[in-house]
């Protein structure tokens, strides 16, 4: 799906599609009452997996060539952190929510956060031509003078 969606839709639209899919998936999980709804959530998870590859592709084409490694390393660091801490927090919220009248409320929180992320994508540069125009107008940075991260 990634090899089809990103070239056809572009990174920002693919990311938005993934975020919309994940938001819908979380909303359905929050109120799911029968097994078929869970299978539908599995189908919604497929386009939801477009987000990370879209971010990686967008970042690698949006930063100066000398900074691609640092930028992608930062993205991977944040991703690793969220993959470790996220399940701990979400698992705790799910345990707390077991006695609530709507036991899926943590999924509603995830849906709201995903919707906020979708809204934040509107600030991203559009397709690669817009990014190229953005860099054409920027001042060149002398990377020789920059201090490495300590």
Image (cartoon, rainbow, N blue to C red):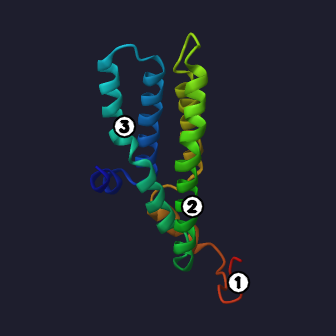
**The label number, if any, that marks residue 45 in the structure image:** 3
Q: Residue at x 54, y 14 (%)?
A: 102
Residue situated in front as seen by the camera: 128 or 2:
2
User: Dot 1 lies on which element?
Assistant: loop
Tag 2 or tag 3, which sits nearer the N-term?
3
**The label number, if any, that marks residue 77 in the structure image:** 2
Residue situated in front as seen by the camera: 24 or 126:
24
The correct choice, above or below, for 104 with respect to 10 in the image is above
Q: Position of residue 119 (x, y in %)?
A: 57, 39
Mark 3–mark 2 Cα distance, whole angstroms, equals 23 Å
Q: Residue at x 51, y 21 (%)?
A: 104
Do the CB atoms of the residues marked 1 and 2 lie less than 8 Å apart? no
**The label number, if any, that marks residue 16 in the structure image:** none
Which one is in front in this view, the residue at disc 1 or the one at disc 2? 2
Q: Position of residue 112 (x, y in %)?
A: 58, 31
Q: Position of residue 7 (x, y in %)?
A: 32, 57
Tag 2 or tag 1, which sits nearer the N-term?
2
The correct choice, above or below, for 140 with respect to 135 in the image is below
**View extreme (bottom): residue:** 144
How packed is label 2: few (under 14 Cα within 10 Å), some, or many (20 or more)?
few
User: Dot 3 lies on which element?
Assistant: helix
Q: Which residue is mark 1?
A: 146
* Quadrant in which the C terminus appears: bottom right
Q: Position of residue 1 (x, y in %)?
A: 28, 49
How packed is label 3: few (under 14 Cα within 10 Å), some, or many (20 or more)?
some
Which one is in front in this view, the residue at disc 3 or the one at disc 2? 2
Q: Residue at x 55, y 49 (%)?
A: 84
Can residue 116 be seen here? The reply is no
10 left or right of 117 in image: left
């Amino acid at each position: 799906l990634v090899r089809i969606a990103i070239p056809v839709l572009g990174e920002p639209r693919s990311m938005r599609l993934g975020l919309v899919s994940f938001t819908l998936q979380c909303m359905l999980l929050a109120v799911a009452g029968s097994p078929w709804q869970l299978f539908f959530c599995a189908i919604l998870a497929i386009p939801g997996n477009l987000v990370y590859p879209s971010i990686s592709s967008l970042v690698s084409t949006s930063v100066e060539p000398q900074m691609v490694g640092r930028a992608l390393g930062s993205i991977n660091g944040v991703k690793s952190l969220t993959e470790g801490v996220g399940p701990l927090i979400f698992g705790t919220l799910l345990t707390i929510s077991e006695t609530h009248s709507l036991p899926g409320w943590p999924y509603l929180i995830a849906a709201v956060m995903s919707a906020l992320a979708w809204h934040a994508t509107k600030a991203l540069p559009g397709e690669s031509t817009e990014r190229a125009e953005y860099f054409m107008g920027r001042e060149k940075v002398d990377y020789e003078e920059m201090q490495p991260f300590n």
